[in-house]
Amino acid sequence: MRVITNKISPDYCADFAAGEIILIDKMYRKTSFDIVHKIRRAVGVKKVGHTGTLDPLATGLVIICTGKMTKKISEFQVSDKTYSGIISIGKTTPSFDLESEFDSETDIGNVTEKMIYEAAEKFKAECEQTVPMFSAIKHKGKSLYKFARKGIEIEREPRKIYINYFEIKKIELPDIYFEISCSKGTYIRVIADDFGKVLGCGAYLKELRRTKIGDFRIEDALSIEEFKNLYEKLKLPQITENESL
């Protein structure tokens, strides 16, 4: 499989029109579509897509496919994902992260480390999750977050997800550092909100980074700037997009 990582040789003969897989480390406050747009402009190929949305406030691994490799997007989408991040307890927001303002605050003086570890145990194996209103999921052709910003609540059916593991890495209240591996379609923001409900004090997702998709790891990913610099050095074949497709 042709994969462009931070370990690739400058002598690699890239053919973005025919199809390449690129591992990108998404920056904070950018969307997955921003990354697609930047890659499309950099390589001059129209057929570019990503294999799974990552929230603007999250950073980390995004798989970009170009040319004929876009046919593999559905294969990557079903892969399990791994994230690291921070859940902060005692406050909540409507979006379950820092995208919206705090709407409640609760004293956390009675929360113990034992309670935190026991709460994490409740999120292992198969469970049901309801898609958050602040999401890009469509309802009658319009993203749910557009309804949410107007204060409109749309009924959503819960769906099954699978948590491979949910590990508490460090506790520095109100912040809880964690790592989680989960199935396709899992919203970590929802897990943060549910985690706060289990503790009885509320919580929100303060920080999130995607570190793994299937067998691909963040350690091998390129920043957009690194990719642009590498692109200038790659030996590109003389072939047009129309000729390759």
Image: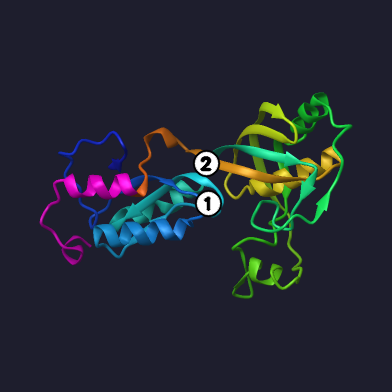
Question: Magenta segment, which residues?
Answer: 225-245
Q: Along the horizontal axis of the image, is 92 left or right of 41? A: right
Q: Can residue 241 be seen in the rendering of this structure?
A: yes
* Residue type beneath disc 2: Arg
Q: Along the horizontal axis of the image, is 243 left or right of 28? A: left
Residue farthest to the left, as pictured = 238
Q: What residue does disc 1 label?
A: 54
The disc at residue 210 is: 2
For the stretch drawn in magenta, the main secondary structure is helix
Dividing the image into 4 quarters, which one contains the N terminus?
Answer: top left
Residue 150 vertical position relative to residue 130 in the rendered view, above or below: below
* Residue type beneath disc 1: Leu
Residue 226 belongs to magenta span: yes
Dividing the image into 4 quarters, which one contains the C terminus?
Answer: bottom left
Separation (CA) of disc 1 from disc 2: 8 Å
Task: Tell me where residue 134 appears, x and y as whole percent.
Answer: 66, 61
Asked if disc 1 and disc 2 are in contact, CB closer than 8 Å, the reply is yes
Which residue is painted at 36% across and 55% down in the image?
Answer: 71
